[in-house]
Each structure stands twice: as C-alpha cells, then as structure tokens.
Image (cartoon, coloured by chain):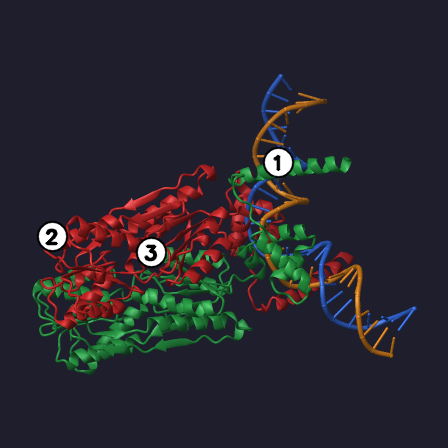
Chain colours: A green, B red, C blue, D orange
Amino acid sequence: MLAEIAHDFYVGSNRFKNEKILKHLNVTSTMKKSITIKDIAKKLNVSTATVSRALRNSSEISKETKLAVIKIAKEMHYHPNLLARSLIKKSSKVLGVVVPTINRQFWSNSISGIESVAYKKGYKVMIFQSAESYQKEVEIVEILANSMVDGILIAFSKETQNYDHIEDLKERGIPVLLFERVCDSIPISKVTTDDFLGAKRIVNHLIERGKKRIAFIGGPLSLTVCMDRFLGYKSSLVENGIPFDQNLVIELSEFTTELSVIAFKNLWSSGESPDAVFCFADILALGVLAASKELGIKVPEDLAIAGFGNDDITKYVSPSITTMSQPSFEIGQLAAKLILKEINFEEKDEFEYKTEIVKPDLIVREST
Amino acid sequence: MLAEIAHDFYVGSNRFKNEKILKHLNVTSTMKKSITIKDIAKKLNVSTATVSRALRNSSEISKETKLAVIKIAKEMHYHPNLLARSLIKKSSKVLGVVVPTINRQFWSNSISGIESVAYKKGYKVMIFQSAESYQKEVEIVEILANSMVDGILIAFSKETQNYDHIEDLKERGIPVLLFERVCDSIPISKVTTDDFLGAKRIVNHLIERGKKRIAFIGGPLSLTVCMDRFLGYKSSLVENGIPFDQNLVIELSEFTTELSVIAFKNLWSSGESPDAVFCFADILALGVLAASKELGIKVPEDLAIAGFGNDDITKYVSPSITTMSQPSFEIGQLAAKLILKEINFEEKDEFEYKTEIVKPDLIVREST
DNA sequence: ACCGTAAACGTTATCGATAACGTTTACATT
DNA sequence: AATGTAAACGTTATCGATAACGTTTACGGT
C-alpha cells in the first residue's frame, strides 16, 4: 500500500520534472518522445548493454534474447541515434565534401562519383557549397571538423590563397583530400586533371587548324588549375613558335557565361582580333559563342572556340564546341577511394600521400 | 613524497589504460587527442560548467574567468564538439535536403535558395541525392531522422509512390516539407510550381502559333508534377477544341536528353507527325531539338518545341528554346522559410500546414 | 565432487557538452 | 547584527549508445 503510494508519487513527481525540463528546452510536451535502448531494456527487464548487443548482432548474446529485443524494438518503433553512436565510436561514417558550387556539371558529377564509392563502403556524404567564398569555405571546414566527419574532400574556392584551415585539419588528425582545385604547398592526398597537358593539347589542336592569334579566357591565376591551363596554353604557343601576347589573356573574376560574353566583346572591340579562343571552362566558351553570334562572327572560320570540361551543353549548341573531356565521375570515385584508404590506414604516421593525375581527352567538334 | 609516488603511479596506470582503450578503438596512439572542455577546466582548476558558460557567453560568469577561459581555449586549440552539443540540446541546427539529383539546374538552384535562408538563421544544410531511387530515398530519410536533423526537405524520386517514410517522420515529430515533387495525400507543408497553369499557358502559346498536333513528352504520371503538367496540356487542348490523341503522349522512364532523342525519333518515324512538342523539362526539349536536327526537321516551321524550367542551356542553343521559367532559387528560399517557421513553432499541434504555389513565366524564344 | 571455462548477461564508466540545482561568498537592507 | 539576495561558481544528472570489465550460471573434463 505504502509502496503503491510512493510509486504514484514518484511517477507524478517525475512527470512534473520532465515537463519542466521540456519547457526549458523549448520543446512542447506534444512532441513525441523518441524511443531509446533504455526504454527497450526497461520493458524487457534487461540491461541496456544487452539491448545494444542484440541490435548490433553481437556474439555474446543468446538467440532468444536477441530475437526478443529485436521484436520489441520493432514494436516500439525504435530508431538508433546516430549522434550518440558517433560520439562514443569517435567516427561518424560521414565524408564531408566542399565544392565551390554544385551548379556545374563537373562538380555535381564528381560528387556523384564520391557518393557511389562512399555508399558502397558504408559512408554517407555531406555536401557543402563555398559559393567561391574563402570565408565560407573556412566556416564549412570548421563545421565539418567539429561534427566529427571521418574525412573531408575539398575543392578550393576561387578566393582561397591561404591554406591554414587545411593545415589545421591535418593538425587535428582529420584526413583531408584536395581535388580539382588544389594547391602545391601542402603534402596531402590530391586528385587532379592533367591541366597543363590538356591545355597544351587543345591549343596545339587550334594551331593545327591554322590559328595564330589565340586568346585565353580564364579565371584567377592564383588557382593552381587556372595557372596550369594557362601555362599549358603558353607552352603550346612557345613550342609552335607563336609569340605570346599578354593582350590576348583575360582573367575573369567570376566563372559565368555572362561575364565571358562581356569580356569577349571587349576584347573584340579593342582591336585585338584573335582568330581563336581557348577558354578555361565550357561555360566561358559558351559565352564566347553567344557573343560571336551577336557580333556576326563566323565560327570556326573567323574564330575557333575551344572549351574545357565537356559539359553536356557543348554537344548540343550549334556549332558544337570542341573541348577537353574530364572524367568527373571517375575523379570523384578516385578521390573517395583515396581518402577512405587514408581513413582506414593503421599507422597514420606512415601513410604516404598520393597525387592522382587524370588525363583529359580532346573532343573535336564543329567550333574548331 | 607518498603523494608524488601515488601520483606518478596514477599517471602511469592511466596512460596504460588509455593506450589499451585506444588500441581497441582501432585508433593509433599517434592520433591527436582532441581538446575538450574538461582539459580546459583542469588547466584552470575550474569546473566544466564554468568553461561551458564562458564559451557560451552566459551571464552567470565573471568577466575575468570568462576571458581566462577563452584565452586558454584558444591556446589549447579548443574546438566544440557539435555532436555532443546536439545530443543534449536535442537540436542539431541542420536541415536535411533530399533531391533526385543535384545534376540539374532546377535542383542545384533550389538548394542554393534553401542554403541562403538557412545560413542566415544559423542552420546548416545537408544535401543528399536519391538518384531517383525510392529505396535510396527511404534510406536517406532514415539516416537524416536518426541524425537528429531539425527538419527535412524532400523532393520525391520518380519511383516514389508510397509515402510511409514521410508519415513516419511526422509520427516521430520531425518537421518535413515537400517541394517540387510532392504528393497530394499528406497534410504537410509544400512548395510547388503551378504546373497545371504553366503547362496550359505554354500549350496555349503553341496553339496560338497555329499548331494543332501537339505531342507531350513527360515522365511517370505517378509523379504529381508530371501529372499536373500533363493535365494542363490536356486542358489547353480541350479548351481550344483540339482533340486529345493518346498516341502523341510519351511517358519516359528517365529524365535524360538521350532518351528523349530516341523517343522523339520513334514518334516521328511511327507515322504520327506532331507539329509541336511540349516537353516536361528543358533537357527533354533539348533532345527533341537534337533529334530534329538529325532528321532535318525545320524548327519552328515544321516543329515547334517547348520546354519547362528555363535552364541556362535553352538560351544558348540554336534555335533557342521557348520555355516556362521557374524561380528555382526563390522556391528554395520559400521552402526553407516555411520549414524554419514550423521548426520554431511553439505548439506543434496547432501549426497550420501551408502550400505555397509559385507561378511560372512564359519565355518565348526561337523554337516556337 | 572439484575446478576450469566460456557463454550470457549486468554494472559502470565513457564520449563531450550542457541543464538543473545546490553552495558559497560578498554585499546591501532594515 | 541578522537577514535577504544575487552573482559566481561547483556538483550531479543527462543526452543515447557502447566499451570495458565484473559476475553468474551451466557444462564439461578429470
């Protein structure tokens, strides 16, 4: 009798306490309480460890209790809390990805490549966009690191010239990999395209077509990838005995078709008349093509246009655009495989950073 | 003296224990131990609560200790563990987004819209791709829910016809919002385009151009958005006294340009000769355009082509493609605002679900 | 019958951070 | 001087799950 009263009192008191807590946490009492292994344990009169073992398919448990636990877990609509698990396991089974934007084929494709490998190995992928902002990139990296992701894959924003945030990650023991937009100064896993050779190859092609005044439209040369393609362009000119002309080089502040249109128009009206343009990316080539149409320039007779990346669009515009194809999906796969290898490596100290360089292919179309 | 020995012993014993633990956790001792508030507390001889208060800018702490804590925190390179914080706060300040793919402008743009709003309110955004697979969509939703995200925004995969996973989320008290690819049967927040009206409008436009045999190329009609555009198409025909012909309706299994090319070629060679095609999406219109070129069909004279979505590419192909523009970025913003309102709503029971319907705009170009 | 052993569980500490609550101290009030 | 009060802290419980370790029980070997 007394025990019953005591029990009632306890229950009542406990409910009151819970409501106070809930109120303070800004959670209404209408919110559904989530089921934990404690609830299951209580219902079955076993310990939480037993429940945990049953649900993890441990060997230290009898078949009957395991089945009983699983049955009750289903009945109670139990869902494991991944945060709690990650906290104690010190591993979230998540890869973080930071790209300038997902709004371009190269990036979305490479992300799909990363995902395809990650999923197979039981990892999830968190995607973040830096929007080409250095500050945002740093913020994102901090968030990812503080969220205990197991590894981070980064393609730098166009503004990024300081790599302290990457060094910090290494300092904290978090595996990092750079892809496509990389830097030279840090010993670290990398996956890139052979931009120098790719650029050289396609500019060679322009020269073979008889072009002699070849312009280059690119982005900030502080980006290694931009610089490499620029150097490839320059190298091709030199090797073919064509004088390099700084006036034919345009450094855009943004990678947009609109800006490319404006830049090319300026170049054309300035009296410098190129007979070909090699663009850092297809979306820029698209701008040159659009501008050419407006200006009544015949492509490829009066102006040959070459891009880089082999975006779908280059195939469908008219004239279709000559470009270097990059296996973006495979680049993503490679990157994921490489960082997973680092993550699951035993002696971190002895891990040897590898740089994978993927070869691009020349795709000749109507614009050259 | 004794105390010192005891201390040494304790330290030694402790290190040994730690190494055993580390070994078992499959973490080498070379791994950097991360700094926690405990470490800071120990160094300053204060409690962890004090450290926490100092770092959270609490009022219940003196200025001096606060500054001292912050100083040491910086010196020790402290980084807060977001998982631990989320676990006790029961809120991760993360929004989960599930889309069929990020590889199309509409989706990547709407995600950018979601992000722009979320960031301003202190929320992060986790992006997942279902790859048009129902099973993967369900898995992703489960992962997101189990990761304690504060809300989930979903655009259904093309396969999704069962909505139990959404009902489950509601059951668990997790705010969900559907956008673009929605369903009718669940009371829930939604953001969509006025697809019926949009389709009607652009088909009206084709009819105004004198077209009478207008084909429709779309996706699975189980998708509400597909069905709505189909109904708009049909409605326009009926209102304009044009007989509906089932032979002119193609239901694609995938949203790809390649498939659209094949489908249109089949349609054309089958003897059914449409004088116009209204495509569910721009990438499909692109396929029809490519096929037309191959087949030597004059656009728009012999065949008018209309798309939906106003992807960048529609502006740059030749002839440029008439389409309905969808404010994808704004749709994302709306969706984020709506779900954040639900997340921060006091009495969940009384929250009224809203359905925002965004109007698309007709953009007439050369293809019609 | 005795002991060793291993299966099958319970107990406790832990992950990192924070909320709830208790305690101390200084200072003001009457 | 006695009491009130609030600032500033420490202690403890908690979030949910799991690892480490201790304990019980049954069973086999000798």
Crowding at mark 2 (Cα within 10 Å: few <14, some 14-19, many 20+): few
Label drawn at residue B223: 3
Q: Dot 2: what SS?
A: helix
Residue A121 percent across, percent down from the top left? 49, 69
- Which residue is the site of mark 2? B208
Q: Dot 3: what SS?
A: loop
In which quadrant of the rendered view does residue A71 lie? Answer: bottom right
Q: Chain of mark 2?
A: B
Cα–Cα span, label 3 and label 1? 47 Å
Q: Dot 1: what SS?
A: helix
Quick one: quadrant of the N terminus of chain A? top right
Residue A134 percent across, percent down from the top left? 35, 58
Circle 3 or circle 1, nearest the eye: 3
A287 sits to left or right of A116: left
Residue at 43% from the left image edge and 62% from the top image edge: B136
Q: How many numbered dots are placed on residues in this image?
A: 3
Q: Are marks 3 and 1 in contact (CB under 8 Å)?
A: no
Q: Are marks 1 and 2 in contact (CB under 8 Å)?
A: no
Label drawn at residue A16: 1
Front residue of B323 and A356: B323
